[in-house]
Image: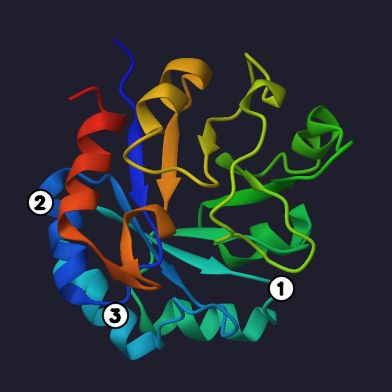
Amino acid sequence: MKRTRVKICGITREADARVAAEAGADAIGLVFYRKSPRYVEPATAAAIARAVGPFVTTVGLFVNAPAAVVLQTLNRVGLQLLQFHGDEDDAYCRQFDRPFIKAVRVSPGLDLAAEMARFPSACGLLFDAWHQDKYGGTGETFDWQRLPEKADLPLILAGGLTPANVAEAVRQVAPYGVDVSGGVEDAPGIKSAALVQQFIARAKGG
């Protein structure tokens, strides 16, 4: 049986990071987009990254950031993977000598195959709901049937996932991984231990 990997994104507290790691999260996401309610300062993010230990991937999320900001953050925080959630192109994303995943906001009429082909250097693609004014974190789902059944890159499903729907999402899409933020929170950036545990268990078939 295929194992579904789980990323808990928008972590802002060390305690939440530890809960996610102990519940079986494969990765945590740290948001370095100042307009997000889940933004974390690099010093806080570094402490969070240390809290999860070496076998949980720490992912840094950026949105249309100047390259210098990404480099400064990399120098201060133990990030193993980068996630670009804005309008970045492949050349921008690959310049940091770090594996990256690219978020694709599934807007109406978007040619997903053409969009996927734009990022040959990515190690995975994350599909999220489209919103006119937001780069992720919308709490909204999209039509999962639009995703291709086969792809050259690992596909990560995001957007509106919760403990209530993640098992069905995994059944329908069979993604490489799932990514959740607001669906496991008591408030923006404040995770619910019970919801994190439920989400991970159900995503992994527990």
Horizontal arrangement in the rendering, residue 68 relative to residue 16 (left or right): right
Residue beneath disc 2: 22
| Vertical relation: 96 (above or below) 147 | below
- Decide: marks 2, 3 in contact (CB < 8 A)? no
Q: Secondary structure at mark 3?
A: helix
Image x and y of residue 146, in percent: 71, 24
The answer for how far apart the CA atoms under marks 1 and 3 are is 21 Å
Alpha carbon separation for disc pair 2 and 3: 19 Å
| Quarter of the N terminus within the rendering | top left
Q: Residue at x 44, y 76 (%)?
A: 38
Image location of residue 169, percent across then percent down: 46, 26
| Residue found 66% across the figure and 44% down from its top | 121
Q: Which residue is mark 1?
A: 64
Residue type at numbered disc 3: Ala
Front residue of 63/196: it is: 196
Q: Callout 2: helix, strand or loop?
A: helix
Graded by Cα atoms within 10 Å as few (under 14), some (14 to 19) or many (20 or more), the crowding at tag 3 reads many
- Residue 81 lies, with reference to residue 121, above or below; the image says below
Residue in the foreground of this view, choosing between 104 and 168: 168
